[in-house]
Amino acid sequence: MPAYVTALVTVTNLEEILTYAKQVDATVAQYGGRFIVKGGPVAEVLEGDLLPHTVTMLEFPTIERAQAWYRSPEYRDTLFTIGMMGAAVRSFSFRIPDHINPHASRREEEAKAS
């Protein structure tokens, strides 16, 4: 079952966050992840008091792979520090159970076809 990591990002140091952005892709790919949205600007806050500049969403094959990426030395020991120096971030991971995920059956069909 796929899992997702979402980050709500408020940039505080553009140079640091650009360095982070150039290097993070390789670490995500190592754990089977991909970016669904990378630094998409927030058009409007519809509810609540969060005011992030951008939103990033990643997809991983499983929650375990998402957690392994986030806790990996490749990410935590280098990029995490750069990212924290360049932005205020709120992030979380989650899964969508197959019984409520409209894309689950399509992924299963695609996997069988390949």
Image: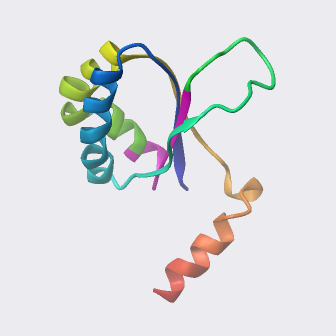
- The colour scheme used to paint the residues is rainbow
Measured as percent of width and height from the top left, residue 9 is found at 50, 23
Q: Relative to residue 49, is residue 94 drawn left or right?
A: left
Q: Is residue 58 located in the magenta-colored stretch of the structure?
A: yes
Badge count? 0
Measured as percent of width and height from the top left, residue 21 is found at 32, 36
Q: Relative to residue 10, is residue 44 drawn left or right?
A: right
Q: Relative to residue 73, is residue 109 drawn left or right?
A: right
Q: Residue at x 53, y 43 (%)?
A: 4
Residue 37 against residue 51 in the figure, above or below: below
Q: Residue at x 35, y 15 (%)?
A: 13
Q: Quadrant of the C terminus?
A: bottom left
Q: Nearer the viewer, residue 12 or 69?
A: 12
The span picked out in magenta is 54-65
Measured as percent of width and height from the top left, residue 34 is found at 42, 53
Measured as percent of width and height from the top left, residue 77 is found at 19, 24
Q: Residue at x 31, y 46 (%)?
A: 25
Q: Quadrant of the N terminus?
A: bottom right
Q: Is residue 61 located in the magenta-colored stretch of the structure?
A: yes
Most distant residue in the bottom direction? 113
Residue 39 against residue 91 in the figure, above or below: below
Q: Nearer the viewer, residue 54 or 3?
A: 54
